């Protein structure tokens, strides 16, 4: 029995194989390749993390099946992005947010490549944003916002629309109320407001790195000393305080600050603090050399760049496009109150109805793109902080301005 039991399956096996050969046998399933794993690092403002994580999720969902993504967010100041990236290009982020004044240096250092087939981006973006993202005729980054400027926030419970036309009037009213008007004189970015519409100039030389500066001029209708004296008069008012952006917002929230110079990034927090009394407008005029001077401003855009050294340049570019898409710029405005660079998003009723955006647009008539080299910042900040303190050393204003201009224009 054991022998028969063993042979029977052996005899049947050829019959089974012959039968199988007589039918169409399905081919064995092909081995499906695992999706490629794409690792991308993104740098952005710390306060943007929640928004960006949501955008990463929608990106991964949209491209599901095409690759397996591992996207890492790392907080990085947009204003210092260039220095961080150029310190280690190969180890830097694949995709990064930065202020537009850094685009020339990043392109010159090889951190950014021109964007190929940029026609669609150009046509979808505001012309000022395209200009801000370009070097010469080449587009080097993806426009994200067109709101990197500043304007006046004010509490309507203390000021009328007529009051906010004059800085001195605002300071007097704030002092009477035991409150403050704030502005950050530790930042040269804001200090430009006093010099910008005076005929005194600052900007980049043709080399794109060094500056020219005539803020110490002793000629013309308004001299550098005239501006310095006007700043000292502002600083002497009990209704004024030089405050950082964080201090300004804290003052708004605790009630000590009733007006100040800031940008759209604080729109939501100011609205929450002041409610229906929230006002926003262009900057006021200030008194200088016996005349009223409209305060100026630097303007600019936030951009998204793709590291030229990224190991996955095509996917990094797709993510940059996704972050700056019309839909996600609308989402950014809803969540963060930031003004879109995308034309359709910027023209939406919701954006047009924003008091902060309206104020920025009103101020744009008196603003210019921020185009200064790195040696602009520290000398101006040092000078302005001394003005905010009331020039305690008593050093000649002309001497200080000469030193400022020499340092800003240093090679």
Image (cartoon, rainbow, N blue to C red):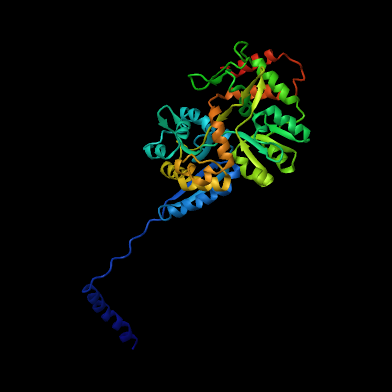
Q: Nearer the viewer, residue 97 or 288?
A: 288
Position of residue 283 measured from the top left corner of the image (x, y, whole percent)? 62, 31
- Which of the 4 quarters of the picture holds residue 216? top right
- Residue reaching furthest to the top: 219
Position of residue 359 measured from the top left corner of the image (x, y, whole percent)? 58, 36
Residue 22 vertical position relative to residue 354 in the rendered view, above or below = below
Q: Nearer the viewer, residue 89 or 162?
A: 162
70 sits to left or right of 402: left
For the C terminus, which image quadrant? top right
Residue 138 vertical position relative to residue 203 in the rendered view, above or below = below
Residue at 47% across, 32% down: 128
Residue 131 vertical position relative to residue 318 in the rendered view, above or below = above
Across the whole image, how many numbered discs are drawn on residues? 0
Residue 217 vertical position relative to residue 176 in the rendered view, above or below = above
124 sits to left or right of 258: left
Position of residue 132 measured from the top left corner of the image (x, y, whole percent)? 48, 31
For the N terminus, which image quadrant? bottom left
Q: Nearer the viewer, residue 134 or 64?
A: 134
Position of residue 184 measured from the top left corner of the image (x, y, whole percent)? 67, 31
Residue at 41% across, 54% down: 35
- Residue reaching furthest to the left: 22
Would you say residue 281 is visible in this rendering? yes
Would you say residue 83 is visible in this rendering? no
Residue at 31% across, 65% down: 28
């Amino acid at each position: 029995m054991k022998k028969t039991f063993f042979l029977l399956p052996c005899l049947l096996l050829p019959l089974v194989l012959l039968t199988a050969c007589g039918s169409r046998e399905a081919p064995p399933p092909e081995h499906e390749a695992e999706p490629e794993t794409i690792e991308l690092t993104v740098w952005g403002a710390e306060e943007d993390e929640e928004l960006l994580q949501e955008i990463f999720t929608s990106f991964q969902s949209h491209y599901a099946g095409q690759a397996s993504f591992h996207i890492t967010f790392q907080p990085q100041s947009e204003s210092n992005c260039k220095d961080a990236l150029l310190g280690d290009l190969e180890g830097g982020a694949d995709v990064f947010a930065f202020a537009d004044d850094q685009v020339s240096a990043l392109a010159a250092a090889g951190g950014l490549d021109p964007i190929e087939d940029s026609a669609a981006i150009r046509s979808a973006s505001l012309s000022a944003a395209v200009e801000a993202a370009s070097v010469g005729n080449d587009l080097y980054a993806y426009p994200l916002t067109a709101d990197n400027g500043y304007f006046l926030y004010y509490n309507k419970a203390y000021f009328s629309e007529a009051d906010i036309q004059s800085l001195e009037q605002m300071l007097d009213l704030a002092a009477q109320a035991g409150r403050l008007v704030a502005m950050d004189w530790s930042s040269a970015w804001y200090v430009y407001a006093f010099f910008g519409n005076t005929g005194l100039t600052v900007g980049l030389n043709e080399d794109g790195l060094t500056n020219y500066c005539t803020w110490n001029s002793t000629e013309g209708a308004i001299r550098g000393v005239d501006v310095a004296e006007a700043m000292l008069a502002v600083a002497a008012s009990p209704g004024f305080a030089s405050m950082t952006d964080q201090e300004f917002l804290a003052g708004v929230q605790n009630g000590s600050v009733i007006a100040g110079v800031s940008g759209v990034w604080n729109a939501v927090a100011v609205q929450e603090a002041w409610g229906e009394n929230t006002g926003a407008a262009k900057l006021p005029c200030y008194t200088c050399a016996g005349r009223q001077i409209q305060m100026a401003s630097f303007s600019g855009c936030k951009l998204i760049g793709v590291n030229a050294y990224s190991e996955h340049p095509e996917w990094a570019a797709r993510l940059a496009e996704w972050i700056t898409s019309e839909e996600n710029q609308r989402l950014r405005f809803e969540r963060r109150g930031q003004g879109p660079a995308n034309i359709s998003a910027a023209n939406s009723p919701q954006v047009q109805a924003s008091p902060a955006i309206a104020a920025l647009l009103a101020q744009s008539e008196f603003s210019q793109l921020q185009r200064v080299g790195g040696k602009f910042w520290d000398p101006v900040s040092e000078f302005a902080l001394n003005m905010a303190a009331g020039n305690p050393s008593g050093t000649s204003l002309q001497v200080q301005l000469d030193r400022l201009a020499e340092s800003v224009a240093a090679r």
